[in-house]
Image (cartoon, coloured by chain):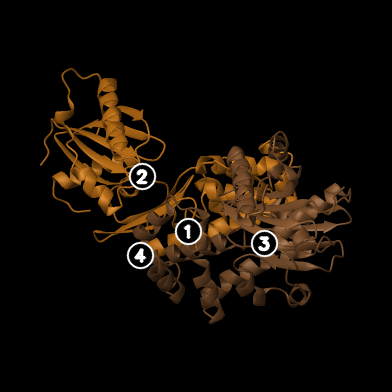
Chain colours: A orange, B brown
Amino acid sequence: MTNSTDFFLGIDGGGTKCKARLEDAQGNLLAEATSGPANAARHLTGSVAAVLEASEKAIANANIKGLRLNQIHAGIGLAGINIPQVKQAFLKQSLPFASWQITTDLHIACLGAHLGLDGAIVIVGTGSSGIAIHNGQQLEVGGHGFVVGDKGSGAWLGKMAISHCLETLDGITPNNPLCEQVMSLLNCDNAYDLVSLTLEAKPVFYASIAPLILQLAASQQEDALLLVNQAATYINKICQRLLSGNLDRLSLIGGITQPLLPYLNSQLQDIIQPAKASPEQGAILYSKMKLTNKVY
Amino acid sequence: MTNSTDFFLGIDGGGTKCKARLEDAQGNLLAEATSGPANAARHLTGSVAAVLEASEKAIANANIKGLRLNQIHAGIGLAGINIPQVKQAFLKQSLPFASWQITTDLHIACLGAHLGLDGAIVIVGTGSSGIAIHNGQQLEVGGHGFVVGDKGSGAWLGKMAISHCLETLDGITPNNPLCEQVMSLLNCDNAYDLVSLTLEAKPVFYASIAPLILQLAASQQEDALLLVNQAATYINKICQRLLSGNLDRLSLIGGITQPLLPYLNSQLQDIIQPAKASPEQGAILYSKMKLTNKVY
C-alpha cells in the first residue's frame, strides 16, 4: 500500500552510471542525481554503493527538510541482475529504504517506455539487448557481452570496422574510404598502430567509431552500408523475436538508435514509437506496482 | 662465416611455448628442448628468459662436455617481433651466444617449410596468419589478435560457434545440433552458463571448441558447414594474397590445418605441400644465412 505522503525513488543502474529520480506520491519530480557504475554482475558491493550514493544525492538535491531514505520507496533496475545468482546475492543486502524492489535495467526501461503496459524495447547503444513484457511474462534477448554477443551495437560496428581496416591494410580487401576515414579518426598510419589501440580496448572505444560508420553509410559508402545493414539485420531479428507474441508496442532506446532506424524493416519502423517515460520513471512504476500487488 | 666446429641453435618462440633445436655444423640434430611462452610483444624480458632457458636445456640434453652458449650461433624467431618497437627493444638485449639473429616466428617457419627458397606459409591454429618470402621481400598478413583479427582460426571458429549458440538460445535462430553439441561439450544448460564461461576466456578456450565444429562440418551439419566455409573463405583470401607475386610454394601449418584443407579452393589444395622442415630448422637456416651474408 502507498499513501499520499510517500516518496518514491526510481533508480537505473548500468555499466557506466547510476541515475536516481525522486518523486512525491503525486508523481511530481523533486530531484535527480547520478553516481558511478552499477553493474551488479561485475561488482555487487560497488553497485549497492552506487545506488545509495545516487539516492542520497537525489535527497540532498530535493532539499526537503527531514527527508530520509527510510521514508522512501525505491524501485531499482540494475544491469546484471538477470543472472539468478547475482539477484539472490543482491536480495540479501540490507538497504535503508521504507521498501525496495529490484529488477533488471531492461525491465524498468520497458515499464517506462510503455507506462507499464505490455510492450517491448530494444536498447542499441554501446551494447545491444531487448526485452518484451507480455501477459506478466518477461522475455530477454541479446546482450551476452562484447566478445560473443552485443551484435548490431555501437561496439560491434566499431569492432567490425577495425577488422575491415586490417583486411584492407593486409591487401585482401581493396582500398576504400571507410578504411581511410577510420585510420584518420584514430590517428593511425598502419596496421601496427591500429592493433596497438585494440590490445586493451574496452567496448566504449569501439563504440566511439560507430558514428563515423553510420555517417558513411548515410552517404552511401558501400563498405559502411554493408556493416550497418548487418547490424540492422540482427536488430530486426531481435525485434521480431520480442514481438512474436503479437505485441504491437516497440521502442528503441540508446545512442545509435536514431541513425540505425532507416535500415530496419519498414514494418518495424511503422510500429516503433518513442519511449513514453524514462527508465527511472519505469523503476518508480515498478515500485508502485509491487506495493499495490500488481504483478509485472 | 661459419666453420665445421660451430654449433647452431634454432629457436621458435610463440605465445604458449619456446622450442630450441641444437645442431652441429653438419646439420646433425644433437638435442631439443622446450621452455615457456616467448611472445616478445606481450613480455619482452620473459621472452628473453624463455629463449635462454630453452637454449640451456638443449645444451644440457646434448651432454657435450664443455659446450657453452658462447660457442653457439643462435637463430631466433619470436612472436610479436614484427612490431618495430619490440624488435628495437629486443636488439638492445645482451645475449651470451657466439652470434645471434632475431626475426619473426612466421619468418623462420617459412624458411623451414621451403628450406630457404621463396614460398609462403599460412599458420592456422589458435590464431591465423601468413607470410610470403619472395625476391628477398617479406609480406605478412593476418594475425592482429583475437578480438579484431585471427579470422578463420580455431579461436575464431569457437567464438563464432558460441555466438551461434547464444542466438539459438535467444530463439532468433532455430534449434540445431551445433548448439546442442557445444552446450553438451561445455557442460552448459542455458545462456547464463555459456556467457559466464566467456567472461574471462582466453583464445585457447575458444579454440578448444573448434575440433567439434570441424567434426560436425565433416558430417555435413549445416550450421557448422557455414562457419567452416566462412573460415575457409578467409584462409583462401590470405593464401591468394601471399601467392599474388606468382609464388607456387605454399605450406599450411597449425592445429586445424588438416581438417580445414577440404574446404579450401581446389587450386590451392593442389599447390599446398607439407613443410620440408620445422620452424627451429628454419631458425638455424636463418642464422647460417646471416652469417654467410645471404639476405632473406
Number of residue marks: 4
Write down the chain letter for disc 1.
B
Whether residue A229 is situated above or below residue B271 in the rendered picture: above
Kind of residue at disc 1: Phe
Asked whether the viewer can see residue A174, the reply is no
Specify few, some or many for label 4: CA neighbours under 10 Å numbering under 14, 14-19, or 20 or more: some
Alpha carbons under labels 1 and 2: distance apart? 44 Å
Same chain under badges 2 and 4? The reply is no
Q: Nearer the viewer, mark 4 or mark 1?
A: 1
SS type, badge 1: helix
Q: Between marks 2 and 3, how big is the CA–CA gap?
A: 54 Å
Residue in the foreground of this view, choosing between A128 and B86: B86
Relative image position of residue B216 (x, y in whole percent): 51, 77
Q: Which residue is mark 2?
A: A276
Report the Cα–Cα distance between label 2 and label 4: 39 Å
> Would you name the residue on which mark 4 appears?
B188
**Residue A111, numbered label:** none
Left or right: residue A125 compared with residue B231: left
Residue at image coords 84%, 48%? B290
- With B159 as the anchor, is A40 left or right in this view? left
Q: Earlier in the sequence, mark 3 or mark 1?
A: 3
Q: Chain of mark 3?
A: B
Is disc 1 on the same chain as disc 4? yes
> Which-is-in-front pick, marks 2 and 3?
3
The residue that label 1 is drawn on is: B205
> Is there CB contact under 8 Å for labels 2 and 4?
no
